[in-house]
Image: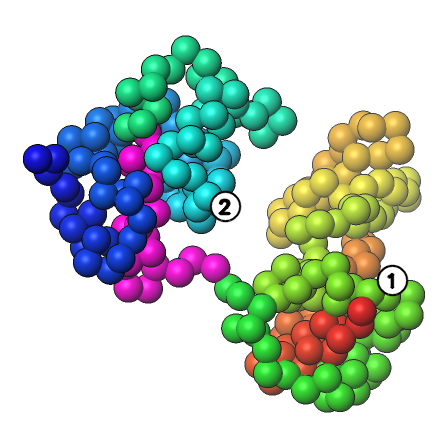
Amino acid sequence: MQRLSGLCVLVAFLGASASCLAASADLVESGRKHFATDCGFCHGRDATGGSKGADLTRSELVARDVGGDLIGEAVRRGNADKGMPAFASMGKEELNALAAFIHSQKLLVASANGARRSVEPDDLAGGSVEAGQRYFQTNCQRCHSAAGDLAGIGSRLKGLPLLRRMLNPDFQRRSPATLTVTSPEGRRFVGALEYQDEFTVAMRDDLGVYRSWSTRTVTYAVDDPLQAHVDQLARYTDEDMHDVLAYLQSLR
């Protein structure tokens, strides 16, 4: 009789799929070793994601997989567009072990208290559209327009991505801030801001030349259209954030 892992016994009690029940503890352990060797460097040793690879415990493909049918095909084929090599020579036994381990990790994450690692749109709901519109018209309308650059944004972004865009658009900056430097001799330099701290400022000019100066030896100014978002963070209340988010979500 095949020995089931403790996790599969729990899953059996909860009424889970037969794919887990077919995976013995030895098979899962074998898959763990193969995964650590061939997959862990991208997807993390526990399959919950790494610096390059996705969290497989939340993968739709894994959720649809039955007995390794989809996982095996994906591993053998690879995905060059996402930097995943093809393991075309991997045998069926290894593939079955990998699939068993990935499914065991998915079930382990699903059964753990506090395992959720995402923020759903409903988690951020509850703001007032009307209050958000008033706040927007007072504080944001100088740079943004509900009928212009933000038209339809509520259809394109929802939940956390929209909140992130609202609070910190720097992560998807399309054009850098502009740095203007005046030397003690009166020479003026203008270029894209490359670096700034209390000691140094640096730019890349129109010719692609990198230039840097000590902040003690020059006068300089930074023109950053996103600075208003940084300044706004000091003024937002939690209620304001939820209200503005609700308003932006209504722009469809």
Which image quarter is the N terminus in?
A: top left
Q: Is residue 226 above or below residue 89?
A: below
Q: Which residue is mark 1?
A: 149
Which image quarter is the C terminus in?
A: bottom right
Say which amino acid is labelled 2. Glu
State left or right for residue 233 relative to residue 120: right
> Does the stretch in magenta take in 114?
yes
Q: Which residue reaches farthest top? A: 89
Point out the stretch of residues depicted in magenta: 98-118
Residue 84 appears at what percent x and percent y?
Answer: 52, 25
Q: Are marks 1 and 2 in contact (CB under 8 Å)?
A: no
State the residue in front, 230 or 37: 37
State left or right for residue 153 relative to residue 62: right
State the residue in front, 196 or 91: 91
Q: Is residue 125 above or below residue 113?
A: below
Residue 94 appears at what percent x and percent y?
Answer: 30, 21
Instruction: Determine crowd level at label 2: few under 14, some 14-19, many 20+ residues with C-alpha closer than 10 A.
Output: few
State the residue in front, 165 or 183: 165
> Does the stretch in magenta take in 228?
no
Q: Which mark is residue 60?
A: 2
Q: Is residue 107 above or below residue 80?
A: below
State left or right for residue 74 relative to residue 21: right
Q: Would residue 38 be seen by someone viewing this image from the given angle?
A: yes
Disc 1 on helix, strand or loop? loop
